[in-house]
Image: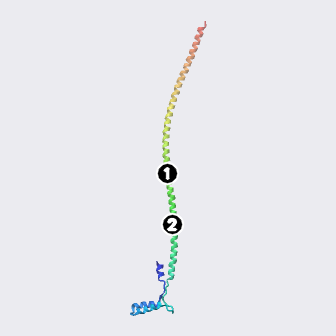
Amino acid sequence: RAIQVMSAENYDRGQAAVLLQRMSTHVPGMEPVLAALQQAQQSSEPGAPEVAAYEYQSGGIVELLESLLNKFSGELSDVEEAESNQAHEFNLVELHLTNTIEKDTSDRDEKSQLRSQRKADSARAQGELSKTKREKADDESLKQEIETTFAVKEAQYEENQKVRADELAAISKALEIISSP
């Protein structure tokens, strides 16, 4: 806006016109003189150029403002580009972290489920182990009972065999005695 205002004022002011305009407000009767001067300027008769009462000297300021505008526009675009890059980088980091969190959550849930499954398997195996130990103890008790019974029956059989052998010997002696005349 400052550049537009300064550029609008960039023209030279004529000396006579300015003097007559000032005088017309203070001196009575100057208005017809001012009108005649303006009519003469419009007829554009060749002659000496009008001397400027004030020459515009703010051209350097306008150029400075324009260079600052260009500089600030460049800096603004650099900052906007950097901000855009940072926003993109943030989005990538956010996406990466979101994916990592989702993966870790999934892994945790999977491990938790596997742990529960293993606990159930372990409890079932403990139950089976306990049952197997009871069955083994029962089987060992039965084995001991069978071995005891076998030992008793074997001893009885051995005794019976001795008795039979003695009976056979007595029978054979009795037959010998009976058969001898």
Which three-letter amino acid code belongs to the residue tagged 1? Arg
Residue 171 is situated, as x and y percent measured from the top left of the image, at 57, 12
Q: CA distance from mark 2 to mark 1?
A: 35 Å
Label whose residue precedes the other's in the sequence (2 or 1)? 2
Which three-letter amino acid code belongs to the residue tagged 2? Ser
Q: Which residue is mark 1?
A: 108
Residue projecting furthest to the front: 43
In the structure shown, which secondary structural element does the residue marked by tag 1 occupy? Answer: helix
Residue drawn at 48 percent across, 50 percent down: 109
In the structure shown, which secondary structural element does the residue marked by tag 2 occupy? Answer: helix
Residue 7 is situated, as x and y percent measured from the top left of the image, at 48, 81
Residue drawn at 48 percent across, 40 percent down: 124
Q: Which residue is mark 2?
A: 84
The correct choice, above or below, for 85 with respect to 147 in the image is below
Quadrant of the frame with the C terminus: top right
Residue 143 is situated, as x and y percent measured from the top left of the image, at 52, 29
Which of 147/30 is in front? Answer: 30
Residue 65 is situated, as x and y percent measured from the top left of the image, at 50, 78
Residue depth check, mark 2 versus mark 1: number of the one nearer the observer? 2
Residue projecting furthest to the left: 28
Q: Colour mode?
A: rainbow
Direction from residue 122 to residue 30 in the image, left or right? left
Which of 51/78 is in front? Answer: 51
The correct choice, above or below, for 45 with respect to 161 in the image is below
Residue drawn at 49 percent across, 47 percent down: 113
Which of 123/96 is in front? Answer: 96
Residue drawn at 50 percent across, 59 percent down: 95
